[in-house]
Amino acid sequence: MTTDYSRKWWALAAIGSGTFMSTIDGSIVNIALNTIQETYNASLGDVEWVVLAYLLGIVCLLPSMGRLGDMIGRRRVYMGGFILFTAASALCGFAWNLPALIGFRVLQAIGAAMVQAMGIALLVQAFPATERGRALGYNGTIIATGVAAGPVLGGLIIATLGWRSIFYVNIPFGILALILSYYVLADDSKRTQQRFDYIGAALLGGALVSILYSLTEGQHTGFGTPLTMGMFFGGFVVLALFIWWERRIDYPMLNLQFFSNHNFSLGLVAASLQALTLQFNFVLLPLFMQKVLNFDTGKTGLLMVVSPIAISIFSMVSGRLSDRFGPRWVATAGIFFLGLGLYRVSGLTAESDVWDIVFRVFFIGTGFGLFNSANTSSVMGNVPREHGGIANGVLSVVRSTGQIAGVTLGAFIWSTQIFAQTGQAYIDFGEAPQTALVGGFQTTMFIAACLCWLALIPTLIRRDTTSA
């Protein structure tokens, strides 16, 4: 059957709108946490769940929503996600107390998971294989723009219209995107004899919640507490049960044979390492600028936009290059530049100025922009198109898990280095001597560069072959 690609750019617009909305909503709320805390007279720990409930909900539901879309039609799930996301946004704006807001954020996460799980798969479906990298490059630019614009737009909207307005603005954009999706996305509704694997979905979701919650909460309560340790190791037990269950049923939620495709599995390994090391920069560099260089919040925020800008530019470049030369060498170049940027950041000192930071961080954005589009093209190109939803869900989970692990590992290494140099543990890094702060940061970022360059191994040994 011949696929009609005449509406591919309209499809990119429809999918990009969903990608932008769900991405920006993950970061825009961060700016409002202090105001929300004051509104509900709540503790910071309780208010953080406004963000965590959304992020954890998305990550844990992505594989299930991807599988559902592969079974009943991706456009149907995508549009259903838009409807739920938009309705939940309105409810978040009307939330009468903090538990209600957190609950509505969970509903938002379900809708966002449906949108994000289907986005890449629909994009791959809308474009010919020879233009896959180009389309994914544009999508990567949209994601980076959403990440960069979230804090800026959030600050402006909250200052002029109040924090509830950050949810209300989703309503008109959601309706317009829904209408556009209805008319331009191909109707791929399916009737299948397969049954949805509810037990598998519950086991995988439970395992991810347990592991990711322990990694997140352990940063606040300590990783040695019985609850944190129990949830961490319990999550892996449930994950083992999931694998056992998937091997014995006829219609598994996740076809484990995908992992026998070396290109697919190696792409996931490389993606996890890149996501992990990128978080070292996003989390630790702002602390360094504020604690060591004494930059204020506004100046720090502006400097942190440099990396997403570079990512948005080079994601498009990466897509075109991977279509022409194959994703392997483009991804390899991306890993090299990202590692180089992290290595250069490890050379920052207490005397570094703004332009010194900009020059070093630009390499990080360049590297990740080159890597991400090319690697995604390789991963998605090595599974049949009819399984694109679940494949994208797995890739997103791997990246998100790497990001959360990166936050935890980066903070742990820096604090360990400070303790090694001072012999004292500090609850607040800012109380440590400046020499220990700088030395610990330099070592931590050097380790990040080495971890990043490890991804050269799985990237170089795979081949530019595709299954779709």
Image: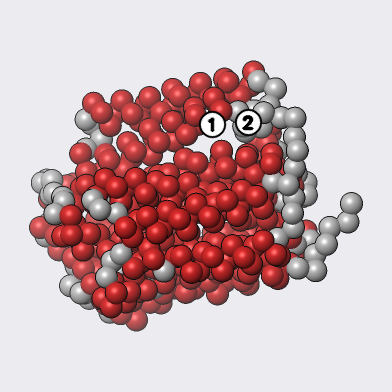
Q: Position of residue 119 (x, y in %)?
A: 61, 56
- 10 Å neighbourhood of mark 1: few (<14), some, or many (≥20)? many
Q: Position of residue 277 (x, y in %)?
A: 42, 54
Q: Quadrant of residue 303?
A: bottom left
- Nearer the observer: mark 2 or 1; the answer is 2
Q: Residue furthest bottom?
A: 355
Mark sitting earlier along the chain (2/1): 2
Vertical position of residue 391 compared to residue 176: above or below: above
Left or right, residue 359 beside residue 328: left
Question: Residue flagged by tag 2: what amino acid is it?
Answer: Phe
Left or right, residue 52 beside residue 464: left
Question: Residue flagged by tag 1: what amino acid is it?
Answer: Ala
Residue name at image x 42 percent, y 53 percent: 88
Residue name at image x 56 percent, y 38 percent: 64
Let me know if residue 192 appears in the view: yes
Q: Quadrant of residue 391?
A: top right
Left or right, residue 52 beside residue 96: right
Real-space Cα distance between discs 2 and 1? 9 Å
Q: Secondary structure at mark 1?
A: helix
Q: Which residue is mark 2?
A: 196
Whether the residues at callouts 2 and 1 have beta carbons within 8 Å, the answer is yes
Q: Of the numbered discs in the image, which one, if any, rests on residue 277?
A: none
Q: Which residue is mark 1?
A: 201
Q: Position of residue 43 (x, y in %)?
A: 15, 50
Let me know if residue 343 appears in the view: no
Left or right, residue 320 beside residue 218: right
